[in-house]
Amino acid sequence: MTSSSSVVGVLVALLCAALEDGTALEPLIVTPPYLFGEEPPTPSALAASYGYPTEEHEVDSDGYLLTLFRIKGPAQDEGQKGKRKASTAEPPALEPFILHHGMAGNAAEWVMFGPGKSLAYALADAGFDVWLASGRGSKYGKKHVQHAADSDEFWDFSWHDQGAVDLPNIVDFVLNATNFKQTWYAGHSMGNTIMFVMNAVRPEYDSRIRHHFALAPTGFMGRVKNPSVVDFKNKLAQTVELWDSLGLTHFSSETPLLSTPRAALCAIFKDTCKQNFFFDTFGSDEKQSFEGQAEITGAYLPGDFSVRQVVHYGQIAAANESFRRFDFGTANQELYNSTTAPEYDMSRVTVPATFMYGAGDVLTVPEDVVAFSKLFRASPPALHQVPFKLFNHGDFITARDQHKYVHQPVLAHARHIREKTGFIPRGYSGSPAAEEKEMKKTKRKLQAWLNSKTAREGPNMVHEE
Ligand SMILES: *[C@@H]1O[C@H](CO)[C@@H](O)[C@H](O)[C@H]1NC(C)=O
Ligand SMILES: *[C@@H]1O[C@H](CO)[C@@H](O)[C@H](O)[C@H]1NC(C)=O
Ligand SMILES: *[C@@H]1O[C@H](CO)[C@@H](O)[C@H](O)[C@H]1NC(C)=O
């Protein structure tokens, strides 16, 4: 029984967005070069080719070996390199900035178009130590100490596991390697979902995130407009049953087309199969397309993903205004001590965040983003709708004008935060619990001080928690 199926053009919709405004454009058909067996350069090889200092690391997270691509600050021309060698002064320590891709994506998303066109370069040029994370199952997260990447055991995970286990491991690795107490973070799509999961289930990590820039923050999905996902959430039970009967544990677009499961999927996803989503997406926001966009994107994306990742999204979409753990049905009682899957509790999360979203996003639609943001009662995120009407889910990583609509706002806001809160302290201790305790003590002292000031100077000085 096969455990994979090719879905170029089917569930890839979860990464992508469809036509927003009813204008039917001719799908742009480009054959991804890797179908001919050509491997595109790794993210660090690509960045190095533009003169950026790079490194590669591997995090062992519960047996999954996840590659971290590091871009250590601005590109250096030959002259600078020489100067640096001649000088004995230590280069300044740059604050870490972790980037995490979405479902069916991979670390190359942040560098694939080159300087001026992809976010990682803008951050590195602004003086950040950029770390491109790889999710388990993604192109650069396919190794496991025990399981082969095509085994069912390997794919037995949802984004819950990535948020509860992998992201904390990645954060610890980066903080330990850089000796900073906090890191900056930006995610795309599922890269934010896993941050939200970590926020909910590993609160001791709140104090390690300086700021979370959430590009298309996928939390609530009840208002999803993408026809294939709407189809999927409406037929969730049947679909899951079908996939179970086929023994599917993951979807692969990196293997040649396997006709049987594809045909079975198309029987359900009629709307999707009528169009090829992958190519539709990158052609749909016509004003944000550019020469080479589809070819380069196609060389890296879409990647593989697990059935459970998709089904978990399907469950929260079907539930509407819900962000909850994976629903295991009859096994819930034993796992959760509850017949239903519990909601993630976002109410006490203290990580400062900016939610950036596009009006043209049919997967993570603005109304869902705004409704989801209201769960964060302790630390309400700043809301920023990209001021371009058709900006869609994929545009955060593929748009021609992402420098204007994504990079510049992120950098401007980071600068503002830094002016307000200062530099991140050095001296990573390796004990989130100890740092959390220390942070709480500081907070209590501050509260007491504020209270004493309130007593002297009258009310309205302190915001109630
Ligand atoms: C922490 O960093 C140090 C120095 O970079 C390294 O030797 C050590 O193995 C790291 N520890 C962990 C747990 O990664
Ligand atoms: C989801 O819930 C919201 C708030 O109750 C409601 O306004 C909206 O119509 C619901 N959407 C769907 C698709 O049921
Ligand atoms: C399980 O849930 C019940 C009812 O909510 C509660 O009384 C009990 O303490 C819970 N058990 C555990 C082990 O959490």
Image (cartoon, rainbow, N blue to C red):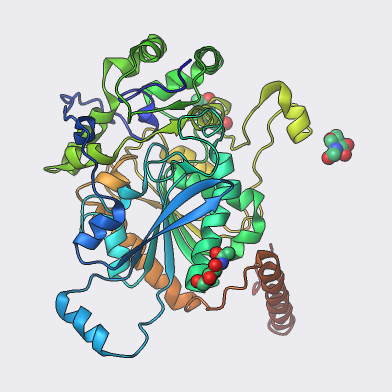
Q: Nearer the viewer, residue 253 or 117?
A: 253
Farthest residue to the left: give it.
291
| Displayed quadrant of residue 46 | bottom left
Q: How many marks?
A: 0
Measured as percent of width and height from the top left, residue 125 is found at 27, 69
- On the rendered image, what quadrant is the C terminus found in? bottom right
Q: Image height check: is 281 above or below 4?
A: below
Q: Is residue 414 left or right of residue 459?
A: left
| Displayed quadrant of residue 84 | bottom left
Q: Is residue 446 left or right of residue 414?
A: right
Measured as percent of width and height from the top left, residue 87 is found at 28, 90
- Residue shown at the point (21%, 86%) measured from the top left: 83
Q: Image height check: is 276 above or below 391?
A: above
Measured as percent of width and height from the top left, residue 99 is found at 41, 55
- Residue shown at the point (28%, 41%) measured from the top left: 300
- Residue shown at the point (21%, 33%) measured from the top left: 32
Q: Image height check: is 151 above or below 350?
A: above
Measured as percent of width and height from the top left, residue 367 is found at 45, 38
- Residue shown at the point (36%, 13%) measured from the top left: 266
Q: Image height check: is 404 above or below 325?
A: below
The answer to whether residue 182 is seen in the rendering is no
The answer to whether residue 137 is seen in the rendering is yes
